[in-house]
Image: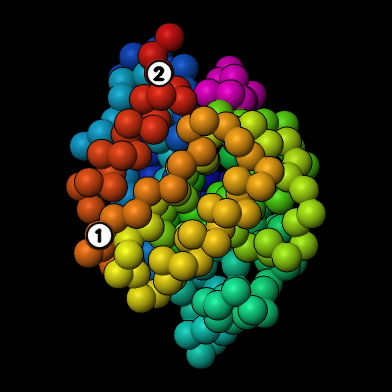
Amino acid sequence: MGLSSSKMNSPAAIINATTKQTASVIFLHGLGDQGRSWKDCFLALKQPHVKYIFPDAPVTPVAINGGMKMPSWFNLYGLSPDSKEDEEGIQAAATNLHKIVNSEEESGIARNRIVIGGFSQGGALALYSAFGCNHPPIGGVIALSSWLPLHKKLDKFYGNQNTPCFQCHGKEDMMVPYLFGQMTHSTIKKYNNHPLTEFKAIDEMGHHSTADEMSSVKSFLDKVIPPV
């Protein structure tokens, strides 16, 4: 479910399980988007035992867009490895994402059956929430066209050193360059050697998703949260 606070809008778009729920996927949209956009994408790959949650980011000013207000998980000052980062905002957003994880756990879903992920800024938040925060392990992480925020301040990973992580990035991405995805994967592999930690490059894909990418997402989810 979404959070009824100023940090995440409520309610989230949801695809409910159609049989007994034994797993949860929490997927975060990119800058300026909304959760229901990704709900439509996941309808084609849903599994009956999984509940899919697509929260909406709060509408806040974003520096990279001249202070324009738009849905954003945290403030963005630039999209380069050396850009200033909104450390306070990233940490606050991660705390709120973990509240959703905790809510699913309290409803009876084991943490190793909960996957977090997202596209672009949403994927960045998912990566930081998994690897930059001291929380118990989860079932997996998905990051599409994303990067790892505050990577210079991470001298270790916390609770998810052995958690499956699927990254996918288009080679023609002009918004979050392909190189950033590669660099993020290299950082993750320093600390996380799970055999399902994978980086997939897609030729001729820009800063968007494709059927090929979503098919790979489904394959990853089928491996980490299969029916039980």
Mark 1: amino acid: Asp
Say whether residue 1 is left or right of residue 94: left
Residue 91's quadrant in the figure? bottom right
- Give the farthest residue toward the top: 228
Q: How far is mark 1 from mark 2, CA to CA?
A: 29 Å
Q: Which residue is mark 1?
A: 203
Depicted 143 relative to depicted 83: above or below: above
Residue at 63 percent across and 63 percent down: it is 149
- Give the farthest residue toward the bottom: 66
Circle 1 SS class? loop
Check residue 183 for magenta coloring.
Answer: no
Say whether residue 151 is left or right of residue 196: right
Q: Position of residue 36 (x, y in %)?
A: 33, 51
Using the image, tell me which numbered label, if any, was put on residue 84: none
Using the image, tell me which numbered label, if any, was put on residue 226: 2
Magenta span: 105-113
Q: Callout 2: few (<14), some (14-19), or many (20+) C-alpha neighbours within 10 Å? A: some
Q: Position of residue 195 (x, y in %)?
A: 52, 30
Q: Nearer the viewer, residue 109 or 58?
A: 109
Q: Give the quadrant of the C terminus.
A: top left
Q: Position of residue 223 (x, y in %)?
A: 41, 24
Depicted 125 relative to depicted 45: above or below: below
Residue 103's quadrant in the figure? top right
Q: Callout 1: few (<14), some (14-19), or many (20+) C-alpha neighbours within 10 Å? A: few
Say whether residue 42 is left or right of residue 194: left
